[in-house]
Amino acid sequence: MRAVIVCLFALLLAPSAFAQPVYFLVDASKSMNQDEQDEAAAFVKAEKAKLAEGTPTSTTPFGSMENGGSDCGEVTINPPRAIVEDIPEQYTRGDFTPVASALRAALKEAATNGGRVIVVSDGADTCERDVCEEVRSHLRRNPKGRRPEFKPVGANDDIVDTYGCFVSARGGEQHGLISGLPPPPEKTDHLWWVI
């Protein structure tokens, strides 16, 4: 009995031990002007401040020359750490915005640990990939997986509409920027008749 009480007490003291990671994908392409970069950094900092202490976070600048922005190449996701790290500033802004590539890599990571993925960007994928197809593909492989979130910085309504398959992360609240049908109900052994 004492062992159970000790375990419960330990769980109460360490809620972040079970916290799911948060993956921030921050646009590092040349299309992001200084005001947008500052807004993106402020958003990430504010979101991290809301997390339980010790929640693992990963901040990945994508679209930099070093991470997919030179040739629409693959994006490498920074590993989550149980510290609140700053957005890395040592990168060269790239010519392309490989949102779909960054999203695919982050969703793959998040599927292993139930993490959240938040894309912070001013524009659409410039590598001719469909970001919503990446989301649909992820949800087909992981039916209980989370939809990624999108925080527009300086994006116009047409750009925001291209992220309709995401959940909005405006101001840290989730708004209903979700398009498409809801997931089917879970299978059950019961039949329900509606009269």
Image (cartoon, rainbow, N blue to C red):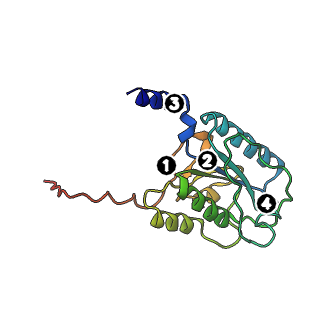
- Nearer to us: label 4 or label 1: 4
Label pair 2/3, CB-CB below 8 angstroms:
no
Determine the CA span between mark 1 and mark 2. 20 Å
Q: Amino acid at mark 1?
A: Gly
Q: Secondary structure at mark 4?
A: loop
Of the residues under marks 2 and 3, which one precedes in the sequence? Answer: 3
Numbered tag placed on residue 10 in the rendering: 3
Point out which mark residue 176 bears.
Answer: 1
Q: Answer few, some or many: residues within 10 Å of disc 3's Cα (few below 14, many 20 plus, some between 14 and 19).
A: few
Q: Are marks 1 and 2 in contact (CB under 8 Å)?
A: no
Q: Quadrant of residue 124?
A: bottom right
Question: Residue at the spot x=64%, y=66% of the render?
Answer: 100
Residue 62 found in image quarter: bottom right
State which tag comes first along the sequence, 1 or 2. Answer: 2
Camera-near label (2 vs 3) is: 3
The alpha-carbon separation of the residues under discs 2 and 3 comes to 23 Å
Q: Amino acid at mark 2?
A: Val
